[in-house]
């Protein structure tokens, strides 16, 4: 375990990738808030990062080694909080970027958390359930010294699930000798999960979409929507949008997409997805590829899959009026400049997809109290927090005549830097 110094923030920002995007965003907020160079460096470099090897004994008896990471970007407002990602493209810079975004996100929705993220460079589709369980348990035991309910709390992200969180919780609890549900969030209800957590990120995406549309005088029920990514975020978002009366015209996953200009029949699509594991091949639709989906003329485009899909190549093709970022970092810096030039309103990831961490916080509070709330209480509290965070961001954007992303970053960075200043520097 070590506290790590990365190369100079500016040189990384220039090199691109998610970390380049995240550092460039931070630099923008630092200039806007007029923070000094010392504070800039404190916010640019993670407080702590752990690199681990994760050996796996495969079902056939052979062994293979994976790399894993846990980065705690900032803990000035509370324990680290952030997801665990299993994906072949995971690397330390991606995890650093995701951890930094978690810091701003938690501050924007005013949670008593810092930002963290973890990942293992593995393609979960190539492994059996029992292999994934062994990888999860070994990864957890390797990073155990730096996690805990008061230290750093994990949640699911791409390629991980409720079941993964149950294995993390069990491994951690067995090592401590008693059950500690608050070490993870997004776990199954049967072992202390929260009602409403599975759909919380998507519900938050819908709340912020409604808020931005209402400001523009558009009724959500009149809106036409395209969603990239049909996983935990995109899939539930499609269902909730449709249930709210919006027309979901197209959705996609990593295998391709489907479109029906009259609106996709969501219950039938869900049935097809559950049966086949993909949206591709859904009968009552035409095929569409991921690039064409991004270019559809719709009211709202929701990128809810991977990073960097709206870049200098695809951004000029985007014809949606609003982009609501369900995924983390779906728009590169250059992509963002092009969207701005074309007058497209972007609800940034650190606001739009914060519903997941809000209900994770509720789950953690419930687990710490060993007292569980009713589903309607969770839904109401989530809606209130999302609307109040949106209102703060939109008010600053109007006052300063800046974009929602810049306003959200300014609020997040300001709250974190204020915590640093008030706490002072030890020793
Ligand atoms: P997931 O693994 O459940 O789903 C990911 C989806 O994206 C799948 O449908 C997959 O097929 C699709 N996909 C993968 N690569 C793709 C590609 N190249 N093109 C098109 N589609 C592709 O993951 P998730 O939890 O839904 O996360 C999606 C995004 O949302 C990530 O950026 C994640 O960090 C972010 N996010 C998730 C949560 C959460 O609560 N799960 C919260 C906040 C943010």
Image: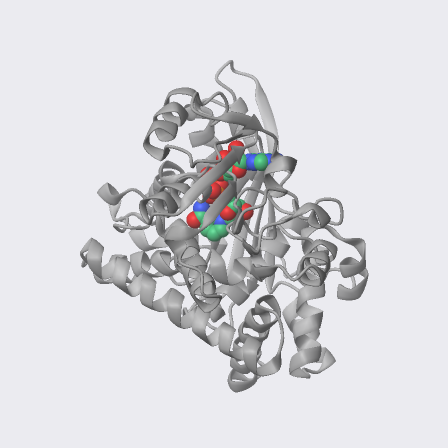
Residue 337: quadrant of the picture: bottom right
Looking at the picture, does residue 29 appear above or below residue 184?
below
In the picture, the quarter occupied by the N terminus is bottom right
Looking at the picture, does residue 23 appear above or below residue 110?
above
Q: Residue at x 44, y 45 (%)?
A: 233
Question: Residue 308's x, y, as percent?
Answer: 66, 47
Q: Which of 11 and 148 is in front in this view?
A: 11
Can residue 216 be seen here?
yes
Q: Which of 350 and 124 is in front in this view?
A: 350
Q: Nearer the viewer, residue 67 or 264?
A: 264
Question: Residue 51's x, y, as percent?
Answer: 62, 47
Can residue 138 be seen here?
no
Taking the image as shown, residue 162 lies to the left or right of residue 69, namely left
Taking the image as shown, residue 409 lies to the left or right of residue 132, namely right
Question: Residue 341's x, y, as percent?
Answer: 72, 62
Q: Residue at x 55, y 44 (%)?
A: 119
Residue 235: quadrant of the picture: top left
Looking at the picture, does residue 370 appear above or below residue 422?
above
Taking the image as shown, residue 169 lies to the left or right of residue 105, namely left
Taking the image as shown, residue 424 lies to the left or right of residue 39, namely left
Q: Which of 230 and 4 is in front in this view?
A: 230
């Amino acid at each position: 375990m070590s506290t790590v110094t990365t190369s100079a923030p500016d040189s990384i920002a220039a090199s691109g990738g998610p970390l380049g995007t995240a550092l460039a965003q931070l630099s923008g907020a630092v200039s806007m808030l007029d923070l000094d160079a010392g504070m800039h460096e404190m916010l640019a470099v993670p407080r702590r990062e752990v690199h681990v090897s994760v050996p796996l004994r495969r079902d056939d008896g052979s062994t293979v080694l994976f790399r894993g990471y846990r980065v705690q970007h900032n803990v000035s407002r509370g324990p680290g909080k952030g997801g665990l990602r299993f994906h072949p493209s995971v690397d330390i810079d991606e995890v650093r970027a995701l951890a930094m975004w978690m810091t701003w996100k938690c501050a924007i929705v005013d949670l008593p958390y810092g930002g963290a993220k973890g990942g293992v460079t593995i393609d979960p589709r190539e492994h059996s359930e029992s292999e994934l369980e062994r990888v999860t348990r070994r990864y957890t035991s390797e990073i155990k010294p730096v996690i805990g309910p008061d230290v750093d709390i994990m949640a699911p992200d791409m390629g991980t699930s409720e079941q993964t969180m149950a294995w993390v919780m069990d491994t951690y609890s067995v090592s401590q000798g008693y059950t500690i549900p608050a070490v993870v969030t997004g776990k199954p209800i049967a072992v202390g999960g929260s009602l409403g957590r599975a759909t919380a990120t998507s519900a938050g995406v819908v709340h912020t979409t409604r808020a931005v549309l209402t400001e523009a005088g558009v009724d959500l029920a009149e809106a036409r929507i395209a969603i990239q990514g049909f996983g935990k975020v995109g899939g539930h978002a499609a269902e909730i949008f449709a249930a709210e009366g919006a027309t979901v015209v197209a959705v996609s996953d990593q295998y391709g997409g489907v479109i029906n200009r009259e609106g996709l029949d969501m219950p039938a699509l869900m049935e097809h997805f559950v049966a086949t594991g993909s949206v591709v091949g859904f009968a009552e639709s035409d095929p569409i590829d991921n690039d064409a989906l991004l270019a559809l003329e719709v009211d709202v485009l929701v990128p809810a899959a991977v990073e960097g899909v709206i870049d200098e190549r695809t951004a000029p093709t985007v014809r949606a009026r609003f982009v609501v970022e369900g995924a983390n970092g779906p728009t590169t810096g250059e992509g963002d400049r092009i969207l701005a030039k074309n007058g497209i309103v972007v609800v940034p990831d650190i606001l739009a997809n914060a519903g997941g961490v809000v209900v994770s916080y509720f789950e953690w509070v419930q687990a710490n109290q060993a007292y569980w709330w009713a589903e309607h209480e969770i839904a109401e509290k989530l809606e209130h927090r999302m609307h109040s965070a949106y209102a703060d961001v939109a008010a600053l954007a109007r006052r300063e005549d800046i974009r929602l992303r810049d306003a959200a970053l300014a609020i997040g960075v300001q709250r974190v830097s204020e915590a640093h200043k008030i706490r002072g520097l030890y020793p």
